[in-house]
Amino acid sequence: MRIQILGGILFIVTLGLLFKSDLVSAEPPQTADPAWFQCAQDADCVVLEGECGWRAVNKTYTDAAQRFFDYLRPMVECAEGGYPEPRPPAVCRQRQCAVPEKDEGLGE
């Protein structure tokens, strides 16, 4: 009987920890992980709405990076015109995802 009760308690605690870890992972990260910005080729990168403008990140980390940028946005005072249209392409420059400047040529 004691073993069944202890087994039941252990099961409930395990379930609680699993659900808690799911909730924690949904919270925005407190810092940007450098891995979010690393790339080997242009296809590794995607453009997101950053804290004050377009930001390029590795597409593997899209959800975590977007949660982080959304978390920062209300705390940052930005200049006008943060998200000019159309959305720019993401490129990989020196193993870092980047948003090219308007006058920067692509494919060079």
Image (cartoon, grey):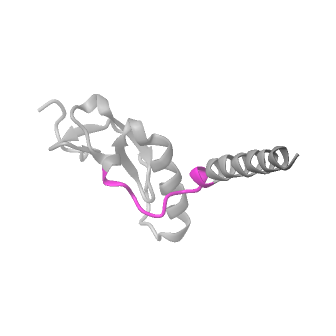
| Image vertical order of residue 39 relative to residue 67, above or below | above
Left or right of 19? Residue 56 is left
| Image vertical order of residue 33 relative to residue 87, above or below | below
Q: Main secondary structure of the magenta part?
A: loop
Q: Does the magenta run of residues contain 31?
A: yes
| Image vertical order of residue 39 relative to residue 5, above or below | above
Residue displayed at 19% across by 33% down? 106
- Residue 71 in percent (x, y) is at 54, 60
Q: Does the magenta run of residues contain 32?
A: yes
- Residue 28 in percent (x, y) is at 54, 57
Residue 86 visible in image: no
Residue displayed at 18% across by 42% down? 93
Left or right of 71? Residue 52 is left
- Residue 66 in percent (x, y) is at 49, 48
- Which region shows up in magenta? 24-34
Which residue sits furthest right? 1
* Quarter of the figure with residue 40: top left
Q: Quadrant of the N terminus?
A: top right
> How many callouts does the rendering have?
0
Task: Please name whichever residue, 107 or 25, is drawn nearer the observer in this view of the structure.
Answer: 25
Left or right of 83? Residue 2 is right
Residue displayed at 60% across by 50% down? 26
Residue 21 visible in image: yes
Task: Please name whichever residue, 77 or 33, is drawn nearer the observer in this view of the structure.
Answer: 33
Q: Quadrant of the C terminus?
A: top left
Residue displayed at 24% across by 47% down? 101
- Residue 47 in percent (x, y) is at 39, 41
Task: Please name whichever residue, 42 or 104, is drawn nearer the observer in this view of the structure.
Answer: 42
Task: Please name whichever residue, 103 or 58, is drawn nearer the observer in this view of the structure.
Answer: 58
Which residue sits furthest left? 108
Left or right of 51? Residue 16 is right
